[in-house]
Image (cartoon, helix red, strand yellow):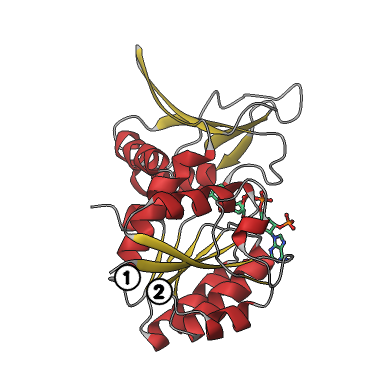
Amino acid sequence: MKTKIIIAGPRGKMGSEAVWMVHNEASFELAACIDRINDGKTLKDIESLPALNVPIFEDPEQCFQEIDADVLIDLTVPEVGFEHTKLALLYDIRPVVGTSGFSKEQIDALEDLSITHGTGCIIAPNFAVGAVLMMAFAKKAAKYLPDVEIVEQHHDQKLDAPSGTAVKTANMIAETRKSKQQGHPDEKETLEGARGASTDGIHIHSVRLPGLIAHQEVLFGGPGQTLTIRHDSYNRASFMEGVKLSVTKVMELNELVYGLENILE
Ligand code: NAP
């Protein structure tokens, strides 16, 4: 039986990629879309999306009431993404959320709701399997090479810096790395910010340029050697394997899982 899916944000860069992924996946069926415009239309009315008779709803609650669906994929903005996720859980539709920027309180509230309803939910700030592996390898390496700096590079439309992935990498590294202040103890910045941001003594440098998508290097240094772990997302298709895996996995869950690394075997 096919997994019936609702996608919120189908005209967005990630959402449109997800629409095509679901359309091309034999075991998935696109049941409906939630959009803030185009109410009452179908997907075939929207340029550059597959010509399907899939209904579009502006009101998420109406969508969840009228459409028989197993999973909601949300790729919107944090304010509405949170409301969509909450509502989906109330209707026992399992959310797979790529929308980034939820607060800890929001995630805790969704976790409570997920447990109360026994409805699975996956929230993943990074769906690129390679990025998740980069973080896991960096955590492992930091145990042996505690001198480490992170350089993350993103497109110049990104609003937040450093990226959530860079912060998460630093947090994961901090779990295995002996805490230390790096660089010369008398180091001084002659230009403010030259050494980047610092969390737990780990420096993070953020590059923003047109042409980039999402890239990160974790550089380790030791006597006479360096180790570089690098991940590049060249386009948004890089995130879709993780979305696909999450849709399959969320059907087996009855609680909330945060982070793709927690569903990779
Ligand atoms: P985007 O191109 O700006 O798409 C966002 C979509 O959300 C648009 O279709 C937008 O509609 C819609 N939207 C905005 N406000 C809305 C509202 N009030 N109600 C309903 N829909 C609304 O952004 P994107 O690059 O696709 O990213 C989408 C989300 O995924 C972001 O949170 C981003 O940080 C996150 N992201 C996650 C990953 C991951 O691996 N987890 C990777 C990349 C991005 P309009 O066009 O009308 O504004």
Instruction: Name the amino acid type tagged 1.
Output: Met
Q: Residue at x 51, y 79 (%)?
A: 67
Return the x and y of residue 223 as percentages of the image width and height.
35, 16
Frontmost residue, 6 versus 138: 6
Q: Which residue is mark 1?
A: 251
Q: Residue at x 67, y 65 (%)?
A: 35
Return the x and y of residue 107 as percentages of the image width and height.
52, 71
Q: Is residue 189 visible?
A: yes
Question: What's the distance in space between the residues labelled 2 and 1, CA to CA?
Answer: 8 Å
Frontmost residue, 95 versus 130: 95
Instruction: Name the amino acid type tagged 2.
Output: Asp
Q: Is residue 182 above or below residue 255?
A: above
Q: Residue at x 59, y 73 (%)?
A: 84
Left or right relative to 50: residue 240: left
Left or right relative to 175: residue 167: right
Frontmost residue, 227 versus 82: 82
Left or right relative to 249: residue 232: right
Q: Which residue is mark 2?
A: 70
Frontmost residue, 260 versus 162: 260
Left or right relative to 212: residue 129: left
Q: Closer to us: mark 2 or mark 1?
A: 2
Please tell me whether mark 2 sits on a helix, a strand or a loop. Answer: loop
Please tell me whether mark 1 sits on a helix, a strand or a loop. Answer: loop
Q: Are marks 2 and 1 in contact (CB under 8 Å)?
A: yes
- Sequence-wise, which precedes: disc 2 or disc 1? 2
Q: Is residue 126 visible?
A: no
Q: Is residue 181 above or below residue 103?
A: above
